[in-house]
Amino acid sequence: MNKEIYSRKTPKGVNNTPAFKLKARVMVLKGGSDALHLMGNIGRQEDDLINVVAEDGNYYIGTFCEGFGFFDVHFLKENVRPMNKEEVEKLNRTYHTINGRVLGKNHYNPDGYWIGNQESN
């Protein structure tokens, strides 16, 4: 893995440590858990999908799959779990759109890694 320094100011309680780049992976943040961002705690009450792109000793770093587009959100590792089979199947049945126009459909393997895109016709 390539090591990359995470040099931005981080929220209180988050160590400013080197982050290790990962292959992007979709995981689940458990409901009621903290999601630390420069704007504060932006956690959700229900389980929600997150896109993890880096990690350090205690945190996964990434974004929520849906929402306002906050980047560099820190999720405590103990509050994150892999997707289960039903969640992967549901994600693979969804299409992504912008302004109501269907752009395509992503496909994920059982571990939450992106494996391809099928363009809309």
Image (cartoon, helix red, strand yellow):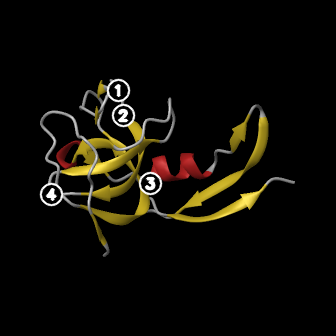
Q: CA distance from mark 2 to mark 1?
A: 7 Å
Q: Are marks 2 and 1 in contact (CB under 8 Å)?
A: yes
Kind of residue sitting beneath label 3: Lys
Q: Which residue is mark 3?
A: 85
The answer to whether residue 111 is visible is: no
Q: Position of residue 72 (x, y in %)?
A: 36, 44
Kind of residue sitting beneath label 2: Asp
From the viewer's perspective, is 30 left or right of 27?
A: left
In this rendering, which labeled residue sits more in front, label 4 or label 2?
4
Kind of residue sitting beneath label 4: Gly
In this view of the protein, which residue sits in the foreground, 46 or 43? Answer: 43
Q: Residue at x 72, y 37 (%)?
A: 98
Neighbourhood count class around disc 3 (C-alpha, 10 Å): few under 14, some 14–19, many 20 upward: few
Q: Secondary structure at mark 4?
A: loop
Q: Quadrant of the C terminus?
A: bottom right
Q: Are marks 1 and 3 in contact (CB under 8 Å)?
A: no
Q: Position of residue 53 (x, y in %)?
A: 39, 57
Where is 1 relative to 16, above or below?
below
Q: Earlier in the sequence, mark 4 or mark 1?
A: 1
Q: Residue at x 30, y 30 (%)?
A: 31
Mark linked to residue 44? 1
Residue 9 lies in quadrant = top left
Q: Position of residue 70 (x, y in %)?
A: 43, 35
